[in-house]
Amino acid sequence: MQRWFILSAIGRDRPGLVAELARLVLDSDANVEDSRMTILGTDFAVILLCSSSRTDAGDRLAVGAKQLERDHGLTILLRHLEGGNRPAVPSVGSQLYRVVAAGEDKAGIVAGICGALADHGANIVDLSTRSQPGPGGSPHYQMTILVEVPDSLGEERLRVALEGEGDRLVIDVDIARERQE
């Protein structure tokens, strides 16, 4: 029987963190199935989806994670996924869309756009944001979201809601159906 785990870690960025975490998974007789990794501020953050057929994989991951926390000052969370792995994206009965919100950097963009998506039953499957100098040096913010939109909702209703939120926030919001491979 396949067992599934989420392992997340945060710590001061430095070379070798990914190798150490990958070694932990391998030494626990588990496999990295999916991952997201990035540098945020001065810290490195990672989320790993791992699987193993070994009954003791969770215990082995937990012991190794504690060792990495002690040795390298990481904060690690390990979670067993009771229901197993999620079906592929997009889920049955939904379509995948890309939403891009961009404009002057200000508080409330993430909350506003994500709130509009939640209010319409759309499920966020990936989100990334960036703030960088824009024209004239003022901060420019961009958020890119992959979202599962229920077939019953439809693109036009969601577009109207997102454009309304964009008008309220004084930012541009675009939505486009994502190509399926």
Image (cartoon, grey):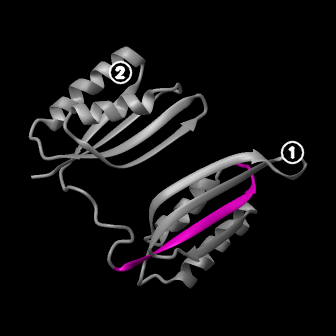
Magenta range: 93-106
115 displayed left or right of 25: right
| Residue 131, x across and y down, in percent | 70, 46
| 109 vs 45: above or below | below
How would you rate the neighbour count of disc 2 (Cα within 10 Å): few for under 14, some for 14-19, many for 20 or more? some
The residue at the point 61 percent across, 71 percent down is 162
- The residue most toward the right is 136
- Observer-nearest residue: 171 or 179? 179
The residue at the point 26 percent across, 41 percent down is 79
- Which three-letter amino acid code belongs to the residue tagged 1? Gly
| 154 vs 166: above or below | below
Q: Is residue 95 magenta?
A: yes
Q: Is residue 151 magenta?
A: no
| Residue 132, x across and y down, in percent | 74, 46
The residue at the point 22 percent across, 47 percent down is 51
| 156 vs 144: above or below | below
Residue pointed to by mark 2: 69
- Which three-letter amino acid code belongs to the residue tagged 2? Glu
175 displayed left or right of 150: right
Which dot marks residue 137?
1
| Residue 156, x across and y down, in percent | 57, 84
SS for dot 1? helix
